[in-house]
């Protein structure tokens, strides 16, 4: 699971949807792996406005990456410093993957396990409300849901 995805994930428990402490999820016992991929500054400059910079820097610091600036870069590539920051972001967000570990909600404490780079967001029945819809279909139209 690439670190970029943590910026788009929040706790799946309904009670946490309105709590600001449910984002970002926090890594625990994370086993990281670096996988080199081609550097794409255009992608980074396009994704930069969509990133929650506070969440990225929090996650980076928790994982030991303390070299990110405290202020969100503007995405320019004009100066050497801009290019350096984009390359650091590339290394963190695109090349760093969590292979094993857990993501933990800061609000409810629920743990989402990560195995072989895949996070399990299925909730146990006591946390997620299982709703089943039964439909009766007559002819071509749906006439009732129970």
Image (spheres, rainbow, N blue to C red):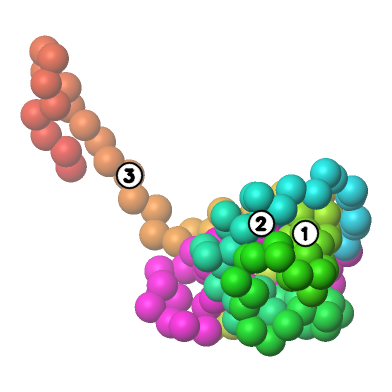
Q: Mark 1 highlights which residue?
A: 90
Q: Magenta stretch: residue 94 in it?
A: no
Tell me the CA gap for discs 1 and 2: 7 Å
The correct choice, above or below, for 88 with respect to 67 in the image is: above
Sequence-wise, the earlier of marks 3 and 1 is 1
Left or right: 130 as drawn, with respect to 7 = left
Q: Residues within 10 Å of mark 3 (few under 14, many from 20)?
A: few
Looking at the picture, how far across and down is residue 115, in whole percent? 79, 52
Mark 3 element type: loop
Is disc 1 in contact with disc 2, using a CB cutoff of under 8 Å?
yes
Name the residue carrying label 2: 44
Residue receiving disc 3: 132
One can see residue 40 in this view: yes
Mark 1 lies on a secondary structure that is helix
Residues at discs 3 and 2 in contact (Cβ within 8 Å): no
Decide if residue 124 is on the left or right side of residue 66: left
Instruction: State the image coordinates of residue 110 (x, y, percent, origin top left).
Output: 60, 73
* First-in-chain label (1 vs 2): 2
Depth check: give the residue in front, 49 or 115.
49
**Residue found at x 55% / y 73%:** 52
Residue 11 at x, y = what percent? 53, 68
**Any magenta on residue 8?**
yes
Q: Which residues are magenta?
A: 4-31
């Amino acid at each position: 699971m690439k670190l970029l995805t943590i910026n788009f994930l929040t706790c799946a428990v309904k009670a946490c949807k309105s709590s600001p402490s449910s984002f970002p999820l926090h890594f625990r016992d994370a086993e990281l792996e670096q996988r080199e991929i081609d550097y794409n500054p255009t992608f980074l400059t396009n994704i930069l406005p969509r990133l929650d910079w506070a969440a990225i820097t929090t996650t980076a610091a928790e994982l030991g990456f303390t070299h990110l600036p405290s202020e969100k870069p503007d995405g320019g590539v004009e100066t050497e410093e801009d290019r350096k920051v984009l390359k650091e972001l590339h290394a963190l967000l695109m090349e760093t993957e969590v292979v094993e570990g857990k993501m933990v909600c800061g609000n409810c404490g629920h743990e989402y396990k990560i195995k072989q780079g895949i996070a399990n967001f299925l909730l146990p029945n006591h946390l997620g409300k299982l709703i089943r819809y039964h439909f009766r279909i007559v002819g071509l139209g749906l006439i009732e849901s129970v």
